[in-house]
Image (cartoon, rainbow, N blue to C red):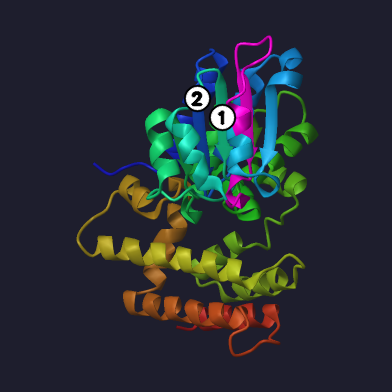
Amino acid sequence: MAKGPAYLDTAAQCSKIISDVRSGSFSPVYLLMGEEPYYPDLACQAIIEAALAPEERDFNQTIFYGLDTDADTVASEARCYPMMAERRLVVLKEAQSMKTLENLATYCEEPSDSTVLVILLRGAKADKRKALYKTVSKCGVVMDSQALRDYEVGSWIGEYYRSRGLKIAPDAAALLGESAGTDLGKIVLETDKMLKSLPEGTTSISAEDIERNVGISRQFNIFELTKALSAKNSERALYIASRLGNDAKFAMPMATAALFNHFYRILTLQARMMKGPVSPQEKAAILGVNPYFLREYDAAVANYLTVKLMRVLALIEEYDYIGKGGGAPDADAREILLELTSKILNV
């Protein structure tokens, strides 16, 4: 049986940590790390809020930053006894910046029963081959938060909105995902900002809500460009590419990454369809998209045969290199995107 997205495991682990600490159950050591900082940050904040009462924090809570401390200082603080409290809390943030991080393995071999030590690596990981990771895995809790793939963002947004008692339309989720990318913290921040602007009691979010409150145009974005390319609508595709390329926030590498992922999905679906009929549910699973978008992919499969798809992917790789300055350091991003769009339409 195929495994689900890795973020579901991380979300479940984060929820368990939060539930445990809120009920008073703490591990002596937490190693919170990963390429995606949202869940480690969320768990760390929950531990800070639950470990001590506000009046206990002055004498029993110490927060270090990796660039400003060393392992001996952190370990010494963790070995101190609590004052008029059940426990001490020692938090090491930005731990990836501490040169002596691995030396904390010695403390973690025999951690204090009266201290909760949180080691937070933001956007980074501890080396799983070394002592710190192995020791905390035995005596405490390790969270490894993997970065989402581009095609998983829409599903994550849907799950996140459901967890907050909200509904979000598939095209709205796609628009928000394009604006924030795989930065989950930004998605949460934009959602909070948007909800403050919407009428109280709003439970359903539309693409119009995203467009008005997040500041991304529904008409001129990479999501709309892939739709126009899938349909081989030359006039609209070139118009969107021109407007998109003129946007001050436009970055060619992000555009080529999105285009490559889109056409690679089409190639994957086409390869599966060559083996026999595919149900709509299976198509959605293969593509990693909401069934709402299947019409676009069906049109793309009809418009781009396998040989053409291979040419398109090669073109995108070529223009990704050009967009990063390869061979044409002074090239205009708008002109590069227009040229790539034109060539895709004419394969």
Please name whichever residue, 165 or 282, is drawn nearer the observer in this view of the structure: 165
Question: Which numbered circle lies on residue 254?
Answer: none
Q: Relative to 315, is 340 on the left or the right?
A: right
Q: CA distance from mark 1 to mark 2?
A: 6 Å
Q: Secondary structure at mark 2?
A: loop
Disc 1, disc 2: CB below 8 Å?
yes
* Residue type (three-letter) at the residue carrying disc 1: Leu
Q: Is residue 276 above or below residue 111?
A: below
> Which corner quadrant of the image does residue 242 belong to?
bottom right
Disc 2 marks a residue whose amino acid type is: Pro
Q: Nearer the viewer, residue 106 or 51?
A: 106
Residue 28, which numbered label? Answer: 2
Residue 345 rendering spot, x and y as whole percentages: 51, 79
Which residue extends farthest left?
A: 275
Q: Quadrant of residue 121?
A: top right
Which residue is more in the foreground, 122 or 97?
A: 97
Tell me if residue 123 is in the magenta stretch. no
Chain part drawn in magenta: 76-99
Residue 149 image position (x, y, % from top left): 47, 53
